[in-house]
Image (cartoon, helix red, strand yellow):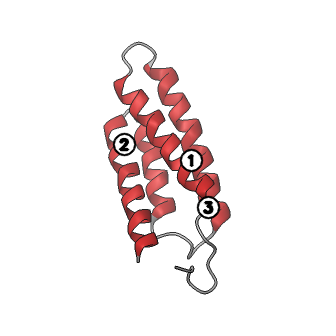
Amino acid sequence: MSPAPGSRPISPRLLNQLATALRAVEGARRSDEDREEAVGTALEDLGVLAELVRDLGEGSLPEGVPARIEEAREALEGDQVEDAREILLGVGRAIDDFLRS
């Protein structure tokens, strides 16, 4: 399957970073003692993901992915870790559907 004209393929690095961010959010969700540190790590990983998404550019990802990543960041900053997790899982599903279409 080739990417749409004018778009760039999604790099494995972006997919790996999404997985890393999800693991960090899951770690924050499960953390009782060092929750603040775990949320900080998740925010850092999410920042790297946001940068990779920006570098990829419009049209190379499903519509709304950058906004959803921002929503996940805002949820984490508000200590709504479960919401951030659900948002990132949705981003993963959207990318998976996009790649399969």
CA gap between label 1 and label 3 equals: 10 Å
Q: Which residue is mark 2?
A: 85
Q: Compared with residue 23, is residue 16 higher up or lower down, i.e. above or below? A: below
* Residue 17: mark: 1
The image quarter in which residue 33 lies: top left
Determine the residue located farthest toward the right in the rendered image.
55
Q: Which residue is mark 3?
A: 11
Judge the density around disc 1: few (<14), some (14-19), many (≥20) Cα neighbours within 10 Å: some
- First in residue order: circle 1 vs circle 2: 1
Q: Is residue 81 left or right of residue 99?
A: left
Judge the density around disc 2: few (<14), some (14-19), many (≥20) Cα neighbours within 10 Å: many
The answer to whether residue 80 of the structure is visible from this angle is no
Q: Which residue is depicted at the point 62% across and 53% down?
A: 13
Label 2 with label 3: CB-CB less than 8 Å: no
Judge the density around disc 3: few (<14), some (14-19), many (≥20) Cα neighbours within 10 Å: few
Q: Compared with residue 62, is residue 24 higher up or lower down, i.e. above or below? A: above
CA gap between label 2 and label 3 equals: 22 Å
- First in residue order: circle 2 vs circle 3: 3
**SS at badge 3:** loop
Q: What residue type is disc 1 on? A: Gln
Count how many numbered circles sit on residues in the image: 3
Residue 32 or residue 101, whichever sits in front: 101
- First in residue order: circle 1 vs circle 3: 3
Determine the residue located farthest toward the front in the rendered image.
1
Q: Position of residue 17 (x, y in %)?
A: 56, 47
The answer to whether residue 40 of the structure is visible from this angle is yes
Q: What residue type is disc 3 on? A: Ser
